[in-house]
Image (cartoon, helix red, strand yellow):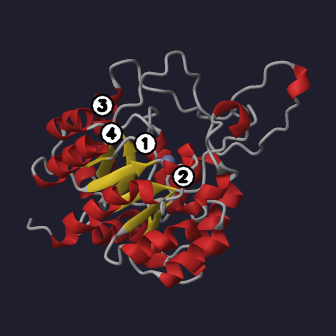
Amino acid sequence: MAQGAPAFTPKSDELPPIIDVHFHAGIESFPGLPPMCPNASQFLASDPDDGPEAPIGWSDEDCSPRLYPSKPGEYLSDMIAEMERLNVKAVVFGKPDDVKKWVEAAPNRVIPGTSFDIGPNVDKAQQLKMLEMAFTQDGFKVMGEIGLQYAGMSPSDMSVDDYFALAEKLDIPVAIHMGTGGSGRANIGTPTYRASMGDPLKLEDLLARHPKLRVQVMHAGYPMIDNMLAMLGANSHVYVDIAGLIWSYPLEEVNRYIERLVDAGFEDRVMFGTDQMMWPKLMSYSISIIQNADYLTPQQKRDILYNNAARFLRIDKEKK
Ligand SMILES: [Zn+2]
C-alpha cells in the first residue's frame, strides 16, 4: 500500500450518495452493437460522392477499457447492481410501463420519469391524461426526456405548451434535451434534428409563459456555453445536466465546458448524469470524470454528484 493511501475500502453503503439525473429505461435492444469507446477525439468529414456515409461521424478509435453493452435481457439487473455498488439513485426515463419495472426492482434507487410523444399523429388529450395519471397517481417525478430538438422544434413552440402548463400546474420539473445529438451526420441519420433548436435561449418564451416551471437543460446546451450562461443568469429555475456530453466529446473540451459553468458562478445548478442506455460501466466511468476533475473543489464535486440534484428534485425535502 502506498503511503497516504486509504487504509480500507469502504462498503458501498458507506460511499457518499450520487444522483444520476439522466438515465434511460429501455434502450437495450440494439442487437450487435459494438463496445463503445467514450470521449472520441474527432468528428470526421465525409463526402456524399464516396458511397454510403455512416449515420454517425465520430472517429472510430480503440480504447482501454472499452465499454460493453449488457447482454440481451440483463441491462436492468446489471445496472441495479452498479447502482448498489456505487450508491447511486437515478432518474430513469421511459414509457411508464418500462419505468415501473425499474421502480419495482429497486424502489430505493429509481426516481421515475416519463414524457410525451411528438408528431402529427399524436393524441394530445390522451397523452395529457396519461401524464397527469403518472404524476398524480403513479409517483412519477420528472417530465422527460423531452426531445423536441430531434423533431426540429423549439421548447417554446406553442403546439407543446399544454404539456409544460401541466408540469407547472403539478409542480413537476421538466427535462428537455438541448444541444448535443447531431452525431456529425444529422443530414444522414437524423434529418429532422436541428442544432439551432438546442440553443438555450429558445427557452425564454416558455419560461416567460410559465414562471414557476423548473427546467433541467439536458446535456447543458452543449456546445452553446455563452447562451447557456445567459439563460442560467436570467432564470434561477434553470439547472443543467452534463449527461451524454461527459463521455461523447473530447475529454479536454468536456472539462473546459464544465469548468466554464462552474467558474461563471453556477456551481449550484450543475447536475451529474450519464444518459445511460446500455453500458453498465459507463456509470463509474462518468463519475470518475468528475472525481478526477482537478479544477473542482471536493465540495463542488459533491454538489455536482449529489447536492444540486437533491435540491432540484426536492429529495432533501422528502420525509425520510
Ligand atoms: Zn438527450
Q: Amino acid at mark 3?
A: Leu
Look at 33% across and 49% down and name the residue there: 86
Which is nearer the N-term, disc 3 or disc 2?
Answer: 3
Q: Amino acid at mark 2?
A: Met
The reply to whether callout 3 and callout 2 are in contact (CB within 8 Å) is no
Q: Judging from the image, what secondary structure is the residue with disc 2 in?
A: loop
Look at 31% across and 39% down and name the residue there: 123
Q: What is the quadrant of residue 175 in the picture? A: bottom left
Q: Which mark is residue 118?
A: 1
Which is nearer the N-term, disc 2 or disc 4?
Answer: 4
Look at 70% across and 42% down and name the residue there: 40
Q: What is the C-alpha distance between the residues marked 1 and 2?
A: 10 Å
Which is nearer the N-term, disc 3 or disc 4?
Answer: 3
Look at 66% across and 44% down and name the residue there: 182
In the image, the residue with mark 4 has its CB under 8 Å from the nearest atom of ligand 1: no
* Pointer 4 residue: 94
Q: Amino acid at mark 4?
A: Gly
Camera-side mark, 1 or 4: 1
The reply to whether callout 1 and callout 4 are in contact (CB within 8 Å) is no
Camera-side mark, 2 or 4: 2
Q: What is the C-alpha distance between the residues marked 1 and 3?
A: 27 Å
Q: Which mark is residue 153?
A: 2
* Pointer 3 residue: 76
Q: What is the C-alpha distance between the residues marked 3 and 4?
A: 13 Å
Q: Position of residue 19 (x, y in %)?
A: 33, 57
Q: Judging from the image, what secondary structure is the residue with disc 1 in?
A: loop
Q: Nearer the viewer, residue 70 or 111?
A: 111
Q: What is the C-alpha distance between the residues marked 2 and 4?
A: 20 Å
Q: Position of residue 230 (x, y in %)?
A: 59, 79
In the image, the residue with mark 1 has its CB under 8 Å from the nearest atom of ligand 1: no
